[in-house]
Image (cartoon, helix red, strand yellow):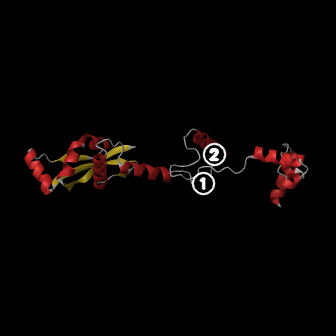
């Protein structure tokens, strides 16, 4: 799922002192995700570092490698976005935003789409797996995954009630009643489908 891709040519990043400090402070987390940087060590004392902050003197960092998530190489822009996230959360960020975007995109693109042909066994397996999820009736974006068409038991109960109330037979409900499984019934359905 996650690998590191070394760049063909090193990429020089120029960032303000604050970005440099963030990169230095969160170097382990950044490297764990696959960004490998050469942080040019500068023998700056605290006073010089503080002056650099005031004057916003840029620092140079060399990007040697980037994370590759499911075949998608992340970029220096993704690194800067992750640095911002780390700064906003005091380093408690778990997943870089760009990784989430790649995973979400891959999940959506590989999902079963409306109109995809599925075998009945595949449909059953999907419904069984959906039952195990906390939000089985919607996808991660809130779109419905299943749509109930009709509750047959409730429909048959209503038909039976109407029939017992004298409001007509189940024949009036377009033959929506239980049929015994028989060759005659199968032949009738076949004839109606052909004509």
Q: Nearer the viewer, residue 149 or 115?
A: 149
Give the CA distance from mark 1 to mark 2: 11 Å
Give the class, few, some or many, for how many residues have Cα within 10 Å of label 1's Cα (few <14, many ≥20): few
Q: Secondary structure at mark 2?
A: helix
Q: Residue at x 15, y 56 (%)?
A: 58
Extreme-top residue of the structure: 132
Asked if residue 43 shows in the view, the reply is no
Q: Nearer the viewer, residue 194 or 77?
A: 77
Q: Position of residue 8 (x, y in %)?
A: 25, 53
| Residue under the point 58% across and 52% down | 144
Point 20% across, 51% down: residue: 18
> Viewed as shown, does residue 108 lie left or right of 8?
right
Residue 30 point in image, percent of width and height: 28, 44
- Disc assigned to residue 123: 2
The N terminus lies in quadrant: top left
- Judged left or right of residue 91, residue 157 is right
Q: Which residue matches tag 1?
A: 116
Residue 3 shows up from this direction: yes
């Amino acid at each position: 799922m996650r690998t590191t891709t070394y760049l063909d040519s090193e990429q020089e990043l120029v960032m303000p002192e604050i970005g440099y400090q963030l990169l230095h402070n969160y170097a382990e987390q950044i490297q764990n995700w696959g960004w490998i940087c050469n942080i040019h060590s500068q023998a700056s004392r605290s006073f010089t570092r503080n002056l650099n902050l005031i004057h916003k003197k840029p620092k140079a960092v060399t990007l040697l490698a980037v994370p590759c998530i499911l075949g998608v190489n992340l970029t220096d822009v993704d690194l800067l976005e992750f640095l911002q996230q780390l700064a906003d959360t005091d380093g408690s960020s778990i997943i870089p935003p760009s990784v989430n975007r790649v995973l979400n995109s891959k999940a959506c693109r590989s999902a079963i789409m409306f109109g995809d042909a599925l075998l009945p066994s595949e449909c059953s397996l999907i419904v069984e797996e959906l039952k195990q999820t906390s939000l089985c009736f919607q996808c991660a974006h809130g779109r419905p995954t299943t749509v109930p068409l009709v509750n047959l038991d409730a429909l048959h109960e209503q038909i039976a009630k109407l029939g017992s109330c004298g409001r007509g037979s189940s024949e009036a409900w377009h033959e929506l009643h239980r049929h015994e499984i028989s060759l005659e019934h199968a032949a009738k359905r076949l004839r109606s489908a052909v004509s």
